[in-house]
Image: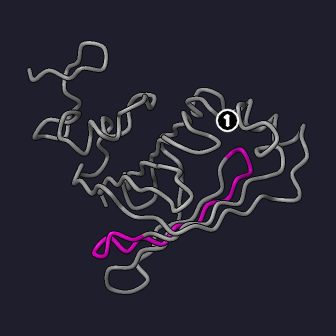
Amino acid sequence: MGTHFIYTYDNGWEYEWYCKNDHTVDYRIHGGMVAGRWVKDQEAHINLLTDGVYKIAWTEPTGTDVALDFIPNEHKLNGTIFFPKWGQDHPEITVCYQNEHIDLMHESREKYVTYPKMVVPEFAKITYIGDAGTDNGETIAEAPYEGMTDDIRNGNYYDENYRIIKKDGHKYVQK
């Protein structure tokens, strides 16, 4: 709980994911067909399978199903994303701050074709692990931008208390 990750799938898609508490996750998508999408307070099933191996699964309002297996001690992840057909055909609809567009996600899920699902099974390398603490609303608090994950990895995005550093544009300056 409280761990913040950045990982890159073998297909090049880059994701950022935060285990907010024992039942909720936040995430931002930095690369791939839905780059620019970000979500807070997604209900998820979070389970310890065995020492150091975690299984997390959820269904989004879009109808997309996600199953992730984290092995943080080895900086590895295996994920499978099950995109509904409409998400593959109209990914631009989901590229937003989902929390402000839940009705649109539900409407699109009903309006467009759901099957066949696009199944994306991929391994990923975890490139960042941070201790954000539980229920930290600043961990995922703004839309992704080009270079954000590098800013985070380089220590230019959060201060020592895991709070967003005050910024001028996207150039971070210490308080």
Residue type pointed to by label 1: Thr
75 part of magenta stretch: yes
Badge 1, how many Cα within 10 Å: few under 14, some, many 20+? Answer: many
Q: Which residues are magenta?
A: 61-76
In which quadrant of the rendered image does the N terminus lie? bottom left
Taking the image as shown, residue 60 lies to the left or right of residue 171, namely: right
55 versus 141 height, above or below: below
Total numbered labels: 1
148 versus 52 height, above or below: above
- Residue 47 % position (x, y): 45, 74
Quarter-of-image position of residue 79: bottom right
Q: Going 41% across and 56% down the picture, which residue do you hit? A: 7
Disc 1 is placed on an element classified as: helix
Q: Nearer the viewer, residue 130 or 148?
A: 148
- Residue 169 % position (x, y): 30, 14
Q: Nearer the viewer, residue 29 or 64?
A: 29
In which quadrant of the rendered image does the C terminus lie? top left
- To which residue does mark 1 refer? 94
100 versus 155 height, above or below: above
- Residue 133 % position (x, y): 23, 51
Q: Going 20% across and 36% down the picture, which residue do you hit? A: 158
